[in-house]
Image (cartoon, helix red, strand yellow):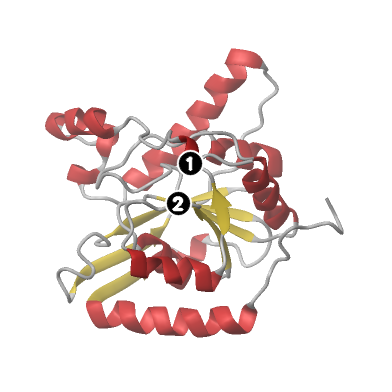
Amino acid sequence: MAGTYPIRYPRRQTSRWCLRQLTGGLIRQFGELEITGLENVPKTGPVILAANHFAFTDAPLLLYASPRQVEFIGGAERPNSPVWTRMIPQAWGFIRAYRGGFSRSTLTASLCVLEQGGVLGIFPEGGNWATLLRPARPGLAFLALHSGAPVIPVSITGSVTLLAKPREAVGVRFHAPIPAPMISESGRAKRRALDAFSETVMASVATGLPDAQRGRYAADPAARIAAEAVSAFPFHAPELRGM
């Protein structure tokens, strides 16, 4: 892919610096932001940031909190986001994901970012239709496997009430990196190994969330039951699919 990258990393450095300063100022006006675990983000080399996704404010929080510029994957269609919030991803520039089906363009662009030693941000759940942790979609494990990039689980807390309840605590926690999977199996055995890797990442994300939001990883049985009710992926409409 060298020489034919659909996305050059890094890019838009001046405009993105300005957007980060503006976004960071707004975030700190609305919430008491605490960023922890920055020592877990390597200063160089490819890395995947995998965060929970409970609200449309998660992307700005991740972009601001990361010490390195992030290329993030976002839904080409975002039915759960207010119209005005769609200006932020458009201004930043993002890799479009077409939910509900295989998207070659999304995977190609993402792997190119990592091949250039970049930072890729992804919300493994594939959408923010619930405020508790759900299973990861297949894309995360696929990208880690084919890029060899380590995955840093990221726990975002307080994003749901960031704008509704000003001055409440908001947190972004970067966990210890998880090495990319090394899988020699094929077929169903490979699928099981990829699923197990995704489970490891999401379990780490869960450790930084309140128990009520940990989904299947919660200690409270009622929370685990609630997670089952919202775990199904809801984005299968034809208009959300892409090439």
Between 155 and 136, the residue placed more toward the observer is 136
Residue 25 seen in this snapshot: yes
Q: Disc 2 marks which amino acid?
A: Glu
The numbered dot on residue 27 is none
Between 139 and 79, the residue placed more toward the observer is 79
**Residue 4 location, x and y as percent?**
83, 56
Q: Disc 1 marks which amino acid?
A: Glu
Between 79 and 200, the residue placed more toward the observer is 79
Residue at 24%, 75% (x, y): give it: 32
Asked if the residue at tag 1 contacts the one at tag 2, i.e. Cβ–Cβ closer than 8 Å, the answer is yes
Between 41 and 129, the residue placed more toward the observer is 129
Residue at 39%, 79% (x, y): give it: 24
Mark 1, secondary structure of its residue: helix
Picture quarter with the C terminus: top right
Residue at 38%, 34% (x, y): give it: 135
The numbered dot on residue 77 is 2
Q: Residue furthest right?
A: 3
Per the image, the residue denoted by label 1 is 239
